[in-house]
Image (cartoon, grey):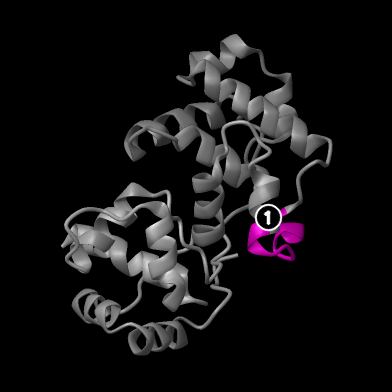
């Protein structure tokens, strides 16, 4: 899946009309250019999220590539069964921390025993219900679940208020003396419904200016 679950042009028009301050941000950043990342499965997407946590993209990509190299016959990528059959020492040997090995095992177990939805089933769940299902996995917190909804599923109305960079971007864009609390950002973002994902993306872009 690589298509948004909404019309980006309509979203940008709505946000520009709803919030003059955000309209200025949109004008400064330019066209909406958020890219979705294709997912072969829910397991694959969450496994990648676990590996990438708290690492640079380069370091995480190296480790993820080493995991894939453990299973050269897995043309569509490694599966829950692969992880369940691999010794901890072998997984640690590719650069995974103990915590990430435990998280990958928990993810593999939950997928293998049908305690998590498939990717197709996830598409049918509303945002809140899906987040609650995903955070049952060890190592997947609310932020990781929200990133999955935004950048994998293309959901239109996700506002990751726990993301410090987003709060920092809001403070800069709206000329606040300090970043708002998560609660304050949630309140400010009410006017951006039902396209808070798009608003978040635009705010993040200001950090690159």
Residue farthest toward the right in the current orientation of the protein: 113
Please state if 71 lies on the left or on the right of 108 as rendered. Answer: left
Residue farthest toward the top in the current orientation of the protein: 89
Q: Is the residue marked by circle 1 packed among few (<14), some (14-19), or many (20+) residues within 10 Å? A: many
Toward which corner of the image does residue 201 lie, by quadrant? Answer: bottom left
Residue lying at 38% horizontally and 69% vertically, measured from the top left: 188
Nearer to us in this view, 100 or 73: 100
Residue lying at 54% horizontally and 46% vertically, measured from the top left: 142
In terms of secondary structure, what is the magenta stretch mainly?
helix
The span shown in magenta is: 119-128
Nearer to us in this view, 100 or 40: 100
Q: Secondary structure at mark 1?
A: helix
Toward which corner of the image does residue 168 lie, by quadrant? Answer: bottom left
Residue where numbered disc 1 is placed: 130
- Judge whether residue 172 is colored magenta: no
Q: Dividing the image into 4 quarters, which one contains the N terminus?
A: bottom right
Please state if 91 lies on the left or on the right of 59 as rendered. Answer: right
Residue 208: image location, x then y, percent? 20, 58
Residue 107: image location, x then y, percent? 68, 34
Residue 57: image location, x then y, percent? 35, 40
Nearer to us in this view, 122 or 67: 122
Please state if 35 lies on the left or on the right of 69 as rendered. Answer: left
Q: How many marks?
A: 1
Residue lying at 43% horizontally and 78% vertically, measured from the top left: 191
Is there any visible trace of residue 84 in the rendered image? yes
Asked if residue 132 is positioned above or below residue 29 in the image, the reply reads: above
Is there any visible trace of residue 41 in the rendered image? no
Q: Dividing the image into 4 quarters, which one contains the C terminus?
A: bottom left
């Amino acid at each position: 899946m690589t298509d948004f679950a909404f019309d980006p042009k309509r979203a940008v028009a709505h946000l520009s009309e709803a919030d003059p301050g955000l309209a200025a941000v949109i004008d400064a950043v330019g066209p909406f250019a958020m890219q979705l990342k294709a997912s072969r499965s829910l397991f694959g997407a969450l496994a990648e999220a676990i590996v990438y946590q708290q690492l640079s993209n380069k370091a995480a990509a190296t480790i993820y590539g080493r995991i894939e190299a453990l299973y050269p016959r897995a043309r569509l990528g490694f599966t829950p069964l692969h992880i369940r059959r691999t010794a901890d020492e072998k997984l640690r040997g590719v650069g995974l921390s103990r915590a990430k090995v435990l998280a990958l095992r928990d993810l593999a177990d939950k997928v293998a025993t049908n305690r998590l939805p498939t990717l197709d089933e996830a598409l049918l769940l509303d945002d809140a219900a899906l987040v609650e299902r995903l955070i049952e996995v060890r190592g997947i917190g609310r932020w990781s679940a929200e990133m999955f909804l935004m950048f994998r599923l293309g959901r239109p109305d996700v506002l990751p208020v726990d993301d410090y960079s987003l709060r920092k971007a809001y403070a800069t864009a709206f000329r606040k003396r300090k970043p708002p609390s998560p609660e304050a950002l949630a309140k400010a973002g009410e006017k951006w419904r039902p396209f808070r994902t798009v608003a978040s993306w635009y705010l993040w872009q200001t950090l690159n200016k």
